[in-house]
Image: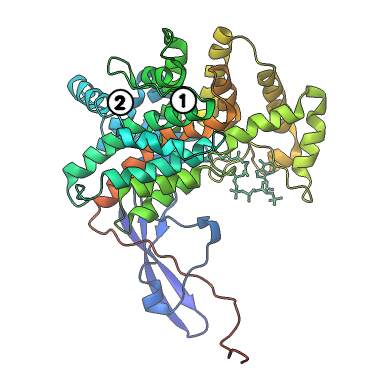
């Protein structure tokens, strides 16, 4: 991180102030404004954090113009092709890919933490049968903090790492329990002889009454999707985990806050919204009508799975997901919504509105079609995103907790409410 200076001139006072400028490995340089208010009395104003780097991080880099995504320097395409999700989790958390021995260790540690406390299963009974699984996931992950609070010292790196492994291990168990509750089937316990994704498929689809065979195509597709979703630097849910975590709160509570942030349709909820949209469009002949609606400023409708705050080019994850989609549908049979989605993409990418605004398909555009082929109901799509993204949330929480400069996150504001006045009584 090299340092230069930028000079700020305040015409009101005639004073000039020098602010440090830092250059990272890649990306836009940043102006350090931490002393700005103390020096000048000004705050900066940046709703939506469009121009604000909220922290320094060594985990993930994405170049929105090039459409490039790197985890710890490794391109997402190579990680998706050559690594497993648990190896990528290890990479995000520890900074390097595991050696074969470290891989066995992480697999063993995750596998042996998949059980959840039996009384947690009772929590699901408190939910109505049609409760959204994201609501159940948020609540039950938050309630893990009730089981691991007094014994957890967040200032102890060993405890933090144990929490990281525990959380990733238990998420699929909680997610599958939420699904089983919705469909009214008995909860299936995790099996230690299965892979991370194989075990999740088992807990989702096995029944006590019959054997369940894990399909390697489904297992592999899910593993790659989790890798693609694992991290995306300071997105809304990761920033939420960091902000909540910065107060020193229980990490399970911080991750539950991240899950809640992910749920929104502008973020992880988009994968569910894409399938709803494709069902609503219904047929290729209706595409033009929906494109016109997406362009109409008086219509709140947006093309779901399109556009991104950072990517102004193809989302590299969407390209990989489209390829997986072909493979999965070869195995599970065609889904007419895939044809529809590809045609929609083709038409949108030729449309001036989308070209001008650099709106491309994002990670959520094709993922729902794969999930649907694998038998996941639409409400589970964002839950799947959450399992993958948990790897990133955990890595960022660990990085933040390890940072000696950690401060509570506390933004300021531009107050435009009423001036001081007296109660008229
Ligand atoms: N359909 C139609 N118009 C759009 C879309 C869209 N999907 N996305 C952006 N625009 C337009 C928007 O109306 C605005 O137009 P104008 O400049 O004329 O006012 C312009 O493009 C810029 O949009 P913005 O809302 O200022 O951009 P943003 O960076 O604040 O929002 C976004 C990014 C992802 C929330 C937005 O593109 C969107 O709502 N997309 C649909 C939802 C979606 O797919 N979300 C998943 C994001 S990727 C997964 C994840 O990381 O969570």
Residue lying at 50% horizontally and 43% vertically, measured from the top left:
262
Image: 15 above or below 271: below
Tell me if the residue at label 1 has its CB under 8 Å from ligand 1.
no
Q: Secondary structure at mark 1?
A: helix
Q: Which residue is mark 2?
A: 87
Tell me if the residue at label 2 has its CB under 8 Å from ligand 1.
no
Q: Is residue 233 shown to the viewer in this render?
A: no
Q: Which residue is mark 1?
A: 225
Image: 86 above or below 331: below
Residue lying at 75% horizontally and 39% vertically, measured from the top left:
352
> In the rendered view, does 211 fall on the left or right side of 369?
left
> In the rendered view, does 203 fall on the left or right side of 422?
left
Tell me which corner region of the image, top left, top right, bottom left or bottom right, holds residue 318: top right
Spot occupied by residue 227 in the image (x, y as percentages of width and height):
41, 28
Mark 2 vs 1, N-terminal side: 2
Residue lying at 47% horizontally and 84% vertically, measured from the top left:
14
Residue lying at 67% horizontally and 44% vertically, measured from the top left:
357
Q: How dense is the environment of label 1, judged by Cα within 10 Å: few (below 14), some, or many (20 and up)? A: many
Judge by depth and name the residue closer to the eye, 297 or 423: 423
Q: How dense is the environment of label 2, judged by Cα within 10 Å: few (below 14), some, or many (20 and up)? A: many
């Amino acid at each position: 991180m090299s340092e230069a200076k930028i000079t700020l001139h305040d015409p009101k006072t005639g004073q000039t102030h020098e602010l440090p400028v830092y250059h990272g490995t890649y990306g836009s340089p940043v102006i350090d404004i931490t002393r700005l208010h103390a020096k000048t009395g000004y705050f900066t104003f940046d709703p939506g954090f469009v121009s604000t780097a909220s922290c320094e991080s060594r985990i993930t880099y994405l170049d929105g113009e090039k459409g490039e995504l790197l985890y710890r320097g490794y391109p997402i395409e190579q990680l998706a092709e050559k690594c497993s999700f648990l190896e990528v989790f290890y990479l995000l958390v520890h900074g390097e890919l595991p050696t074969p021995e470290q891989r066995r260790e992480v697999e063993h540690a995750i596998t042996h933490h998949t059980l959840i406390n039996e009384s947690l299963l009772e929590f699901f009974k408190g939910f109505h049968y049609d409760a959204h699984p994201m609501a159940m996931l948020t609540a039950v992950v938050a309630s893990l903090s009730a089981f691991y609070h007094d014994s957890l010292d967040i200032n102890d790196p060993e405890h933090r790492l144990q929490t990281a492994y525990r959380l990733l291990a238990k998420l699929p168990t909680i997610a599958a329990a939420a699904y089983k509750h919705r469909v009214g089937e008995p909860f299936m316990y995790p099996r230690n002889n299965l892979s991370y994704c194989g075990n999740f498929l088992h807990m989702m689809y096995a029944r006590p009454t019959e054997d369940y065979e894990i399909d390697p195509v489904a297992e592999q597709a899910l593993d790659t999707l989790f890798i693609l979703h694992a991290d995306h630097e300071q997105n809304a849910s990761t920033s939420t985990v960091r902000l909540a975590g910065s107060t020193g709160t229980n990490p399970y509570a911080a991750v539950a806050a991240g899950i809640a942030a992910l749920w929104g349709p502008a973020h992880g909820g988009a994968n569910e919204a894409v399938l709803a949209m494709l069902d609503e469009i219904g047929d290729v002949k209706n595409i033009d009508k929906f494109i016109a609606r997406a362009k109409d400023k008086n219509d709140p409708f947006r093309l779901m799975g399109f556009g991104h705050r950072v990517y102004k080019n193809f989302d590299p994850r969407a390209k990989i997901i489209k390829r997986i989609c072909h493979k999965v549908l070869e195995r599970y049979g065609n889904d007419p919504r895939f044809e529809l989605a590809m045609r929609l993409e083709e038409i949108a990418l030729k449309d001036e509105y989308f070209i001008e605004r650099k709106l491309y398909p994002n990670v959520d555009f094709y993922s729902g079609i794969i999930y649907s082929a694998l038998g996941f109901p639409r409400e589970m799509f964002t839950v799947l995103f959450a399992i993958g993204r948990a790897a990133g949330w955990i890595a960022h929480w660990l990085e933040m907790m390890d940072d000696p400069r950690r401060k509570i996150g506390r933004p300021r504001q531009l107050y435009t409410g009423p001036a001081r006045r007296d109660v008229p009584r």
